[in-house]
Each structure stands twice: as C-alpha cells, then as structure tokens.
Image: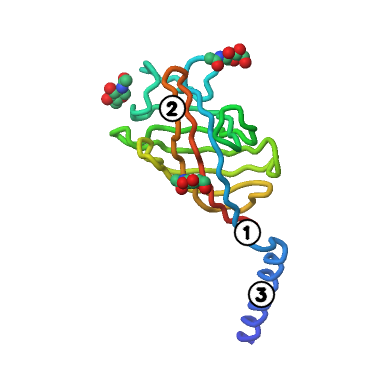
Amino acid sequence: MASNKITFASILFLTIFTYSNAKLGHLKETELSVYYQDYSGSQNATVIEIPGPSNGALNFSRFGAMFCTDDPITVGFEEGSAVIARGRGLYVTSALDGSNTHVMLSVVFIDGEYKGSTIELYGSDKQFEKVREVAVVGGTGKFRLARGYATFETLYFDTGRSHAIIQSNMTILHY
Ligand SMILES: *[C@@H]1O[C@H](CO)[C@@H](O)[C@H](O)[C@H]1NC(C)=O
Ligand SMILES: *[C@@H]1O[C@H](CO)[C@@H](O)[C@H](O)[C@H]1NC(C)=O
Ligand SMILES: *[C@@H]1O[C@H](CO)[C@@H](O)[C@H](O)[C@H]1NC(C)=O
C-alpha cells in the first residue's frame, strides 16, 4: 500500500513537471547591449538624490545617500540614438567607505521587440570600478522567470553637462 502511494505521488509529480515544462517552453538565452544616457546636473536631470536630513551637493560617496533614476536607455552610444527603454529605480550608497552602491533597477522597455516587458536588476555595484556587475533577478513579459547578469561600464562623461553614457551588457536566461 505504501509503495502504491509513492508510485502515485511520483506519477503525479512527473505529470505536473512535464506539464509545466511544456507550458514554459524552452529556456532561451538573450544577450543585449544597451546604453544609459544619464544626466545628473540640475537641469533635466534623470537622476536625483532623494532629500535627506543633511544633504548638500550630489555626492555618490556618502554612506546612506539615496538616488532615484529614470535614465533613457538607447540602442546605440550616441545621445540621439533611439530610446528603447528607461532605467527606472533606486540606488543607495551602501558601503561605509562609499565604494559600493546597492542597485534596484527595472529596465522598462518602451519600444522595439521587447516593448511592454521588463528586466529586474539587483545587487551591490562597485560604483567606482571600470566594469561593474549586478544580477538579473527576474523579469516580466518576454523576460518572465529571467535570471542572469548585467555589466555596466561608463564610456563617456561630460563634466560640464553632467552627462554620462554607460554601456550595459545583459546576459539573460528566460523562457
Ligand atoms: C532641458 O529640456 C528643455 C526642454 O526639453 C530644453 O529646452 C533644454 O535645452 C534642456 N536643458 C539642457 C541643459 O539640456
Ligand atoms: C562626499 O562624501 C564623502 C564621505 O562622506 C566625503 O569624504 C567627500 O569629501 C564628499 N565629497 C564632496 C565633494 O563633498
Ligand atoms: C559589452 O559588449 C560590447 C559589444 O559586444 C563589448 O564591446 C564590450 O567589451 C562589452 N563590455 C563588457 C564589460 O563585457
């Protein structure tokens, strides 16, 4: 009787497993290379510091400093390149010495083949290193159940306009 129960449970499990596998389809890998057009100056800023009790000038090294961002994300390096997504979210300087920022960011696609889908980025980012990396922890739409990683590399910075162009490569496994 006991062995019958086990067999029944195994069959049920196998059935559910096979069914959900069929429903999800095959695991796909997508590689994307995009550019964040980031403006941290006071005019038309796409990143601002969230006001705190002792905020002075924008300072990414101050422990506890929080930033809200809505950067246009373009397909090419140029500032006028087509915008396919927005980088919307928060980051918080999370290392006592200011070296790391904690990134909680959604890549919200607003145009192109992924319009309406999102990719969720999360993790500790060594903000002053040449190449930074955070995890892809999820997604919606075409990126449901996504996981993977994303790199960031600042390729250009215009101090006068506080305009940075940051290349981001994402490797994403999803269904
Ligand atoms: C800010 O945006 C306005 C309206 O789009 C534009 O006229 C102005 O030149 C922009 N300023 C900067 C510094 O880019
Ligand atoms: C930014 O904050 C750090 C840590 O408090 C401090 O050492 C640094 O001098 C500040 N930079 C500016 C430009 O205020
Ligand atoms: C990101 O991808 C571009 C284009 O493939 C490549 O030139 C660049 O080296 C990559 N950056 C990183 C940090 O892997």
The residue tagged 1 is 28
Which residue occupies the foreground of this view, 21 or 37? 37
Whether 100 is drawn above or below 54: the answer is below
Tell me residue 159's x, y (percent).
41, 21
Question: Could you tell me the amino acid type at mark 1?
Answer: Lys
Its colouring scheme is rainbow
Residue depicted at 63% across the width and 42% down the height: 118
Question: Could you tell me the amino acid type at mark 3?
Answer: Leu
Whichever of labels 1 and 2 marks the residue nearer the N terminus, that label is 1
Q: Quadrant of the N terminus?
A: bottom right
Which residue occupies the foreground of this view, 152 or 121? 152
SS at circle 2 = strand
User: Quick check: 97 left or right of 34?
Assistant: left
Residue depicted at 43% across the width and 17% down the height: 160
Which residue occupies the foreground of this view, 86 or 90? 86
Q: Which one is closest to the eye, mark 1 or mark 2?
A: 2
Tell me residue 49's x, y (percent).
45, 23
Alpha carbon of mark 1 to alpha carbon of mark 2: how far? 35 Å
Alpha carbon of mark 3 to alpha carbon of mark 2: how far? 55 Å
State the mark number for residue 14. 3
Question: Could you tell me the amino acid type at mark 2?
Answer: Phe
The residue tagged 2 is 157
